Image (cartoon, grey):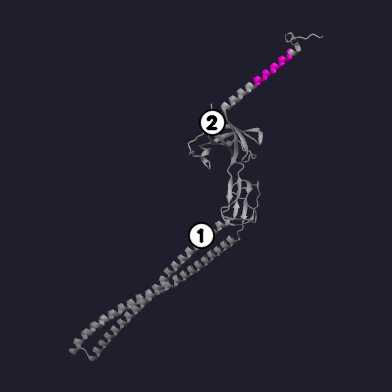
Amino acid sequence: MAATHSSGDAEPPSGAQRRILTAGNLVVLAVTVAATLWGLWWLYDRLTNTYVLDARVSSDMLLLSSQVSGWVADVPVAGSQTVKRGDVLVRIDDRRPRARLAELRAAVAVADADLDAMAARIEVTDHSTASLLDAARSRLEAAGSELEAAQGDLEVAEADWQRAGPLRERELLSQQEFEEIRNTYRSAVQTVRRREAGVATARADLAEAEAERARITVLGAEQAALQQRREQALRQVEQAATELDYYTITSPIAGVVDELFIDPGEHVSASQRVLVMHDPGRVWVKANVKETELRHLSEGDEVSINVDAYPDQARRGVIRTIGQAATSEFALLPNPNPSGNFTKITQRVEVTIDFAEPDPRLKPGMMVEVKIPHRS
């Protein structure tokens, strides 16, 4: 029967076994040291930098709407298409506003013709009434001169007639001479009366000429009214031309059409959105930073950005702005905590970061990771 050995009689490890144990201890030690160093480095990195893992690429997304109602006639662009400033994006059927504009322009042309005709009437009336007025004034002046002459002759004849009576009573004047003086006096009286009638007639003619001349004032008032109607028609033309421009929607920027909400043949209403676009050369990063980390940040600090879509390249950025309110203040349903129960949650503040170098591959909504070194 073979003899058995107790545990106390175990043989010591050989040299090969001791070498294996020593190598294993070294591996464990190396791994432990490496893990410790990595942990220390990770702790130091987290203490000296602020990380935001849920940041996004952002841009000004322009939502274009229609200013008028109508049927969509043409959409010459497609989604993801690059356009230049002023390129046509949407055309709405504009036959009615074009007809309205043509009608208003015709009204302006009619107003111009009426103004030309009125100006011609005023010119003709001015020339004709000016000559009539001058002639009436000349006749009145002549009649006045003739009246003055007749009145002078009457004064002489009246004086002779007053002397003739006593002279005839004293028979110092013959009957024939007496009658001649009497006839001269009577003739002078009739002449004065005729000259007075002539003056009255000349004054009536002058008044009539002045009344005709006053028609220029009336025609001038009518001309001013026509001018006002023309100005009103011009304003209507300008308004109609502006409204006609609304039927063609053009790009306000050089950018990319992100999404179209309409198709040709659809009916759009005023204020209805038609597409959304953005400028690919103007993108930035929006990062929501914990409020406890804000003391380490300031505008103008440089940061490191890693885009998830292109992880092989780290990008540099600069903090443009730091928000002035926590993002919770802009929530649609704020929590006023009316019950008195309170759970403290670290708030976040939006930080805007500009890329140091533009990259056309960056698109709004892409996820990025941001590393912000703490200020020393």
**Dot 2: within a 10 Å radius of its alpha carbon, few (fewer than 14), some, or many (20 or more) residues?**
some
Which amino acid type is marked by label 1?
Arg
At horizontal 60% and vertical 38% (from top left) the residue drawn is: 56
User: As drawn, is 123 to the left or to the right of 23?
Assistant: left
Q: Quadrant of residue 313?
A: top right
Q: Residue 207's spot in the image, x, y percent?
A: 37, 74
Q: Please report the residue visible at 63 percent of the width from the left and 21 percent of the height from the top.
A: 36
Question: 291 or 215, which lies in front?
Answer: 291
Looking at the image, residue 87 sits to the left or right of residue 212; the answer is right
190 to the left or right of 38: left
Q: Which residue is mark 1?
A: 235
Name the residue carrying label 2. Answer: 293
Q: Is residue 150 above or below residue 362?
A: below
Point out the residue furthest to the bottom here.
Answer: 175
Which marked residue is nearer to the observer: mark 1 or mark 2?
Answer: 2
**Which amino acid, mark 2?**
Glu
Position in image of residue 95 (x %, y %): 61, 61
Q: What's the mark number on residue 199?
A: none
Q: Give the residues in magenta.
A: 18-34
**Is residue 31 highlighted in magenta?**
yes
